[in-house]
Image (cartoon, rainbow, N blue to C red):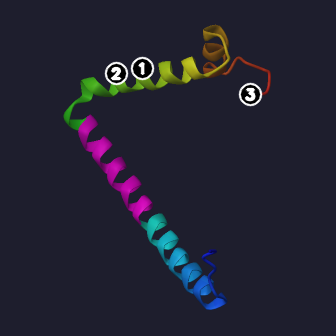
Amino acid sequence: MKNELSQKEFAALDRKIERLETKIVEVKHNYDELLSQYTELFELRHPEKKQERIKETLYSAYCKSNRSLDEILAFMAGEYEEDW
């Protein structure tokens, strides 16, 4: 027994999905904004942790890359000529 939807049901579902997608984008934007504010305040409150976060972020990016540490440092210094 197949559960088939009518055109009217498809249209209703499409409208509901569209409304939810709009809300999701809005909530995600608000979340990103709040997270940015939180990070800024947290780093003002705990300046010693900002440097550690930067180190962790750089190390994580290095581990995920297929570049050598020398290549990455040269790129960051603006000395790397090859396209990335």
Q: Is residue 6 left or right of residue 52?
A: right
Q: Quadrant of residue 74?
A: top right
Residue marked by disc 1: 55
Asked whether disc 1 touches disc 2, contact meaning CB atoms under 8 Å apart, the reply is: yes
- Spatial distance from mark 2 to mark 3, Cα to Cα? 26 Å
State the residue in front, 26 or 74.
26
Per the image, label 3 sits on a secondary structure element best described as loop
Amino acid of disc 3? Trp
Q: Residue at x 65, y 10 (%)?
A: 68
Residue marked by disc 3: 84
Label 1: few (<14), some (14–19) or many (≥20) C-alpha neighbours in 10 Å: few
Q: Is residue 80 above or below residue 30?
A: above
Amino acid of disc 1? Lys
Q: Quadrant of residue 75?
A: top right
Residue marked by disc 2: 52
Q: Is residue 16 above or below residue 75?
A: below
Q: Is residue 20 left or right of residue 52?
A: right
Q: Position of residue 6 (x, y in %)?
A: 64, 87
